Image (spheres, coloured by chain):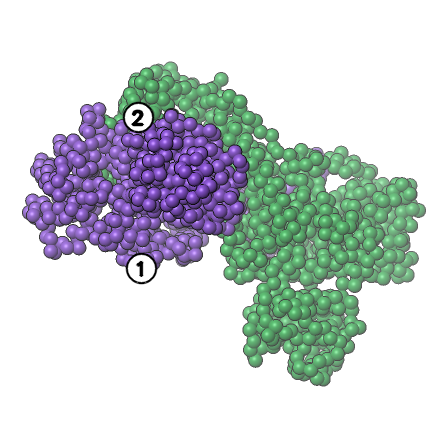
Chain colours: A green, B purple
């Protein structure tokens, strides 16, 4: 998505001869005689096109006519002869109308001739006999025209994602544009595309549910191609796990060519043949081994080139092992891979020569006339580094590490390679350490930074992005293709403006700022770990890190939910797809493993909290399935059924060969109690929740120790109830492990701010260590309305319901190791909430800090 | 709200003679011949009532008939003569039909006679000539009958909060109940009610917007009375700031009496007169001083008793100063209050005697025949403690501290006082340390615990709750009145079941568990501090406490929003009133002051973060007004317009005498930079975000240091860009303050997991301290697919996009105090994210801990 600001910036950068009148958006949803009217009272201008212009132009125009219909309610009319009045005129340089305009100097030939995939969009008076004024969209070639057409679609309010992300189209019955000339210039990268990969089970299920086919047919691919073209891509690698693009549906290749998409085959599928075309005939064909089975393989290759000889498809050359593995290696066992390098290099060069001979034979031209690519993916890069020769004209496709980091750039010397370089980049990956197939986990900054690295090293012939099932990779697809058009338009400073423009296109300007902020943080947080890699040990439980990262997700979810509620109903599906679902789904996985970490911790201590956290794990696991079911079955009225069925819980190796999502293991404590625990110092204190006493004695009067869950500021309160009974005989005991205890320990207490309702001079308890001297603590003696207390102590304390008390408690000699703290109430109404033993690190605060680490007492 | 479980429990506890068939809910929304049919195909049974029974019964019956209409679409018919078939028969012991049923022994006289406010609800065959079977609701007195009537309303699905909280009524066309006899027994507390107080600006504005009156008229009060009766209250103190219940609308007192509500006047309004009745005539009446103006005051008192002599109203006696101040004191200056105790005690006793003489004169009976109350509020309690005599028959009203803690209970000896004791309790307060008028801040546990204390000390004659504007105190009102009926039904263990029952009544059983959890935590969190008391210093910023409490609110909000989205549309208003609004509103206030705390911290350091946080403060301030506007204007179609206009931001003393909510002060930094900062150790480390360098030098090649916001796991990444240029000359410097630095410091680095794209043996930087020996760090030498690295290092690292590195760096001699860390890249592509100097406290984690405290370098 490109805002007009960018468009015009490009105008100046790339095509300085083109004048722009205004650097604001050209589209207005109102009319003015100053501006050129596209739609008036719901009626769109007719679109004039030469019927002999390229099919790609005709097909894109049908989309544009329908887009006018999406906006106005009535499709625009496409005409092949001029109609009087105003018009839109569209064509490539092959169009007779465009030729006529160039001839009459109504448009500038120099702007287009010899250019690649460039359009100009310009208002012209009396362009052609009978037409008063026209908006002319002229392309340097067929794709130039197509991009101009889809630029106009965007300008009238149709997002490239209207179909694939259900972005609603705002209704307007009047549209005008500023008169002037606009262009996006030429693309920085020659081949810009996406690779549908790892397409089972999601994409394949969705296709089956949607089209009833076990493969992607031309109806499916036409929708993908349209998206790619709307995003100004021109290139694609088709899905190849179980599908064979060329073989499954003979219309597939034709549709690509008709629409203007250049097809390729993936890094390991040479000679315009799909891997499945071999795999389905393995018995018949024999081994995928060029040395032992050269004749069959050569015929296989030859058929590929024969099929592709009349289209633009980019030919992949080279060879990997059978099914995207290393030559001589074994899938999933990269660490065991050894090879006879020299031998394989010689073999690869031999294969390459044979492949180019085939190209020459079939096309009847020198092989360098037909664009080719050799992918230095995984082990192939090693051979290249060891001296593998790649023919001068062949594009060398470098790659990232499957996780978004570029493995290598050309050296100064290598830059002399005439074929130039390309980059194979991933936002989805099937492989170690774990598959990354479920959600988008690519931080915006990482893609930006590595694509800068890429472009700064002149890697600009191919940029291809592995997008998995396509959904839910909407944003990285847009960003990747946008950057492929003009990487240098994106800087560290304006990067978020790009995200803003994207969000504004999907949700409108008023929602864009907040959506941008949330989308950015979502990508950032998701970048820390995939769902597939997460487990209870990913973050540090003890230092609060686990809680922190879970909180970050939860905060973002709250903010996204606020925004979701503020959206118009027809925007909600798109928002769910882009932001809310991935955020809730990933946040929930975080919460689940965090709960598991807590469960395991408390289970190790035999404490009752273990069971609460076990429940939480199971609730999260259940919620995961509900969120995914909502995506598949409810969202957009079930349009995306099957698209969100990827397993993502229960990985134990890189692969997802486990039957189904599996709830993380939890441990339930059958007879929980806190009697065997001891608290350890941390950061200079031992902080204890009052509920975690190791033993207690009720009062002889019958008053009983009562835990009041959630009483007070943190965990709970512990009180001897009822208060109308005597307290004698009652006590609570706590254990803590301290080495080198001083003679006296300062101990802080947080209690409910019980007033001295019974003993006006204050209610008291005794505190002692290891049976030593008892210190009396009167915790509420100042909680009264005496003038000296009322404002300074009484009001501020009672209004917050908690009172702090402190005692210096004698530690008997030889009390190292485990100390026992004993609390004995002397008056009723003591509700103990928290106890903090100060070893020098006590900080005043409302909550008196986190509870200290606990161990089982040995 | 009482579930039938509770009802039946009460049956056994209080009225063991009554048999219950089933301890499950009696109501079924289907029919069965086993059960008694109340509604069939939308048609409700007729309700038979004696037209001469008390008006309270007649009025409540009208509600019940309408409640049947709310459920079925058609109101039930009220008849005064038996109709053939089945019926509902309702009445007090005064009803001729009930008398007839007692006479025919169809109902057990002993269950009702001499009982207080008790009903029995029982199915009776052939109760009266012509009726086959009836559900009989019989009351021991008029309120007993009313409570039985409203119990049936609840059972058919009408919440007591259907009007005051917009709880939707589920539609049902068939309703039957289990045959049997049910009762809730007698109430534990004699007078159970609420006090509308502090009613400006919210309640007064809402009344003005709703009724057009400048006072609460009988239409308004009738709605309040109905609520109180549905909740089984019987008592009220009316609003008295600017309104005069008795004087404003002559129908008010009559309406109360007709409906069965016992009125009182507040603790400082003696003799059934509203304070406003005096205040409005102060010029005419003179001083509110019994000594100097006895005659006028006596007449004023006398008029009150004359007006109330024929109703049940409870007479407040005693006297405070003019307008709820201490006798001889000054409002808001409690700390300056001094009095001549003996003199005032004598005066009060004299006043009391005079008041009782008036009662005797006017009623013509001994004063002890007319129930009276004397409130020991604030200073009055002191006089009581000093010996003030209260007549034996007068109820002594003790009180809490205005914040929910009981000030004092009767001693053993005092318990002999025949009049007994009452409790004046608050969930709203105007006074020090700050008003608490905006939201409910009473934790459920606190109210439970203190009301247990209350009841355990035999304080059971009056329980009156100060509820402010009534809204948004829905839950505490319900809980208080429920507990007033039977405090001992609520234990620490079943407390949440009560909340569950309440939530199930408002939102249905399927939503009740989660609503209970959220409501409980909301009350708990809100109990820590009122919005009015909060400021940037309330929580500890440096140790993360502020963030923690904000996160708790945000987490709860996310959970509430999830639930809100899952509700039926007609449930959303009620949920917003009870949970979502108070949660979002208070959470937002927390976030605002937290942002202010951050703003002030970073402003003190002159760092750019100050401005981001300043923006956040302002956004929160703005959001507060939007949330309140939504409550007033949109929620429930604007039904509650004016109810949420309480000022709550900008308090500087206890009182809200500031013109309007005021955005907390923020400091914007005009020329922010980080050049003057120094990091301090905390918890054994110094952790530095890479962006916080104090100085930097770009490379001589032109490559520049570039901060990439949000790159990496925490704050940002810092990179020298473009990577295609040489790095020589570039450096970053950081400052930290360490005393007693060791000879060598272990330093950890988190960097982007840049691969060795340029230098296959790894990319390097130098690190040095105070210009000392430079240590070379090669951060990515193992990030390759060599067999020994690929699974153990490469995959796990690149998949998480961050690589850790470590160096032991020499510290030059005499380097105590401020150390300067210098980082110099030797190869391109270093993206530094975080630097952690280990002083012994380093813990491995994903995020490498929180950034250490910062000071301005002196």
Q: Distance between the residues labelled 1 and 2?
A: 49 Å
The secondary element bearing badge 1 is classed as: loop
On screen, residue A260 versus residue B263, left or right, reads right
Q: Name the residue under label 2.
A: A723
In the rendered image, the quadrant that contains the N terminus of chain A is bottom right
Toward the bottom, the furthest residue is A129
Query: What residue is at 17 percent from the left and 55 percent from the top?
Result: B280
Label of residue A444 in the image:
none
Residue B199 versus residue A535: which sits nearer the camera? Answer: B199
On screen, residue A211 versus residue B145, left or right, reads right
Estimate the x, y position of residue A176 in percent, counting from the top left.
Answer: 59, 74
On screen, residue B323 versus residue B845, left or right, reads left
Is residue B291 visible in the rendered image? The answer is: yes
The chain identifier of the residue carrying mark 2 reads: A
Query: What residue is at 16 percent from the left and 45 percent from the top?
Result: B305
Toward the right, the furthest residue is A295
Closer to the observer: label 1 or label 2?
1
Q: Residues within 10 Å of mark 2 (few under 14, many from 20)?
A: many
Query: What residue is at 75 percent from the left and 52 percent from the top?
Result: A211
The secondary element bearing badge 2 is classed as: loop
Estimate the x, y position of residue A486 in percent, counting from the top left.
Answer: 65, 61
Residue B399 versus residue A367: which sits nearer the camera? Answer: B399
Residue A78 versus residue B227: which sits nearer the camera? Answer: B227
Estimate the x, y position of residue B562 in percent, counting from the top left.
Answer: 52, 45
Q: Mark 1 points at which residue?
A: B212
Tell me which corner region of the image, top left, top right, bottom left or bottom right, holds residue A815.
top left
């Amino acid at each position: 998505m490109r805002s007009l600001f960018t468009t015009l910036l490009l105008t100046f950068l790339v095509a300085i001869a083109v004048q722009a009148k205004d650097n604001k958006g050209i589209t207005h949803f109102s009319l003015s005689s100053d501006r050129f009217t596209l739609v008036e009272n719901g009626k769109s201008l007719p679109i004039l096109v030469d019927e002999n212009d390229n099919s790609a132009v005709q097909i894109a125009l049908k989309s544009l006519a329908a887009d006018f219909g999406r906006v106005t309610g009535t499709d625009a009319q496409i005409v092949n002869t001029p109609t009087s009045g105003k018009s839109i005129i569209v064509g490539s340089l092959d169009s007779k109308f465009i030729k006529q305009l160039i001839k009459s100097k109504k448009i500038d030939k120099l702007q287009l001739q010899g250019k690649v995939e460039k359009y100009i969009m310009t208002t012209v008076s009396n362009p052609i006999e009978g037409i008063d004024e026209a908006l002319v969209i002229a392309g340097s070639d067929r794709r130039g025209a197509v991009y101009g057409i889809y630029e106009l679609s965007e300008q009238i309010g149709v997002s490239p994602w209207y179909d694939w992300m259900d972005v609603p189209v705002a209704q307007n019955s009047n549209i005008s544009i500023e008169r002037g000339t606009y262009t996006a210039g030429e693309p920085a990268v020659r081949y810009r595309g996406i690779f549908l990969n790892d397409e089972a089970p999601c994409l394949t299920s969705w296709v089956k549910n949607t089209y009833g086919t076990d493969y992607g047919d031309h109806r499916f691919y036409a929708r993908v191609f349209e998206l790619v073209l709307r995003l100004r891509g021109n290139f694609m690698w088709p899905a190849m796990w179980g599908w064979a693009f060329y073989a499954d549906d003979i219309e597939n290749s034709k549709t690509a060519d008709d629409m203007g998409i250049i097809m390729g085959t993936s890094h390991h599928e040479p000679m315009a043949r799909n891997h499945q075309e071999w795999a389905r005939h393995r018995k018949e064909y024999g081994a995928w081994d060029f040395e032992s089975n050269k004749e069959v393989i050569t015929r296989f290759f030859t058929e590929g080139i024969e099929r592709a000889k009349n289209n633009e498809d980019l030919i992949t050359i080279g060879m990997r092992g059978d099914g995207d593995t290393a030559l001589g290696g074994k899938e999933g066992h990269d660490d065991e891979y050894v090879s006879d390098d020299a031998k394989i290099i010689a073999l690869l060069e031999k294969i390459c020569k044979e492949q180019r001979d085939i190209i020459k034979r079939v096309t009847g031209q020198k092989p360098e006339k037909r664009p080719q690519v050799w992918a230095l993916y995984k082990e192939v890069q090693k051979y290249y580094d060891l001296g593998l020769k790649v023919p001068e004209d062949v594009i060398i496709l470098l790659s990232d590490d499957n996780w978004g980091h570029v493995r290598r750039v050309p050296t100064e010397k290598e830059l002399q390679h005439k074929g130039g370089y390309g980059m194979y980049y991933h936002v989805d990956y099937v492989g170690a350490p774990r598959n990354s197939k479920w959600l988008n986990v690519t931080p915006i900054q990482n893609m930006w930074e590595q694509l800068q690295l890429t472009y700064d090293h002149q890697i600009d012939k191919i940029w291809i992005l592995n997008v998995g099932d396509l959904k839910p990779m909407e944003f990285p697809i847009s960003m990747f293709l946008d950057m492929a058009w003009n990487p240098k338009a994106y800087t560290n400073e304006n990067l978020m403006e790009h995200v803003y423009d994207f969000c504004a296109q999907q949700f409108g300007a008023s929602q864009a700022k907040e959506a941008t902020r949330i989308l950015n943080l979502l990508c950032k947080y998701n970048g820390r770990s995939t769902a597939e890699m997460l487990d209870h040990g990913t973050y540090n439980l003890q230092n609060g890190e686990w809680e922190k990262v879970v909180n970050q997700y939860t905060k973002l979810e709250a903010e996204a939910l606020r925004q979701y509620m503020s959206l118009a109903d027809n925007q909600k599906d798109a928002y769910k797809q882009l932001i809310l679902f991935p955020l809730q789904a990933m946040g929930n996985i975080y919460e689940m493993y965090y709960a598991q970490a807590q469960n395991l911790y408390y289970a190790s201590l035999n404490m009752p909290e273990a069971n609460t956290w076990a429940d939480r794990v199971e609730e999260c696991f259940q919620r995961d399935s509900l969120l995914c079911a909502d995506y598949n079955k409810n969202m957009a009225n079930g349009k995306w059924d099957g698209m969100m069925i990827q397993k993502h819980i229960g990985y134990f190796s890189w692969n997802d060969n486990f039957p189904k999502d599996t709830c993380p293991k939890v441990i339930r404590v059958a007879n929980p109690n806190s009697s065997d625990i001891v608290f350890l110092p941390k950061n200079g204190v031992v902080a204890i929740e009052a509920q975690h006493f190791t033993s207690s004695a009720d009062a002889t009067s019958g008053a009983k120790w009562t835990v009041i869950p959630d009483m007070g500021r943190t965990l709970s309160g512990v009180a001897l109830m009822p208060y109308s009974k005597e307290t004698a005989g009652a006590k609570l005991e706590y254990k803590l492990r301290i080495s080198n205890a001083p003679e006296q320990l300062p101990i802080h207490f947080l209690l409910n701010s019980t007033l001295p309702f019974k003993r006006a001079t204050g209610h008291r308890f005794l505190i002692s260590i290891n049976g030593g001297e008892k210190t009396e603590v009167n915790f509420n003696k100042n909680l009264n309305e005496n003038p000296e207390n009322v404002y300074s102590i009484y009001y501020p304390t009672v209004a917050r319901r908690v009172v702090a008390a402190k005692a210096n408690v004698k530690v008997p000699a030889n009390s190292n190791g485990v100390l026992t703290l004993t609390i004995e109430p002397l008056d009723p109404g003591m509700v103990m909430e928290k106890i903090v033993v100060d070893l020098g690190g006590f900080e005043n605060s409302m909550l008196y800090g986190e509870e200290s680490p606990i161990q089982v007492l040995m």
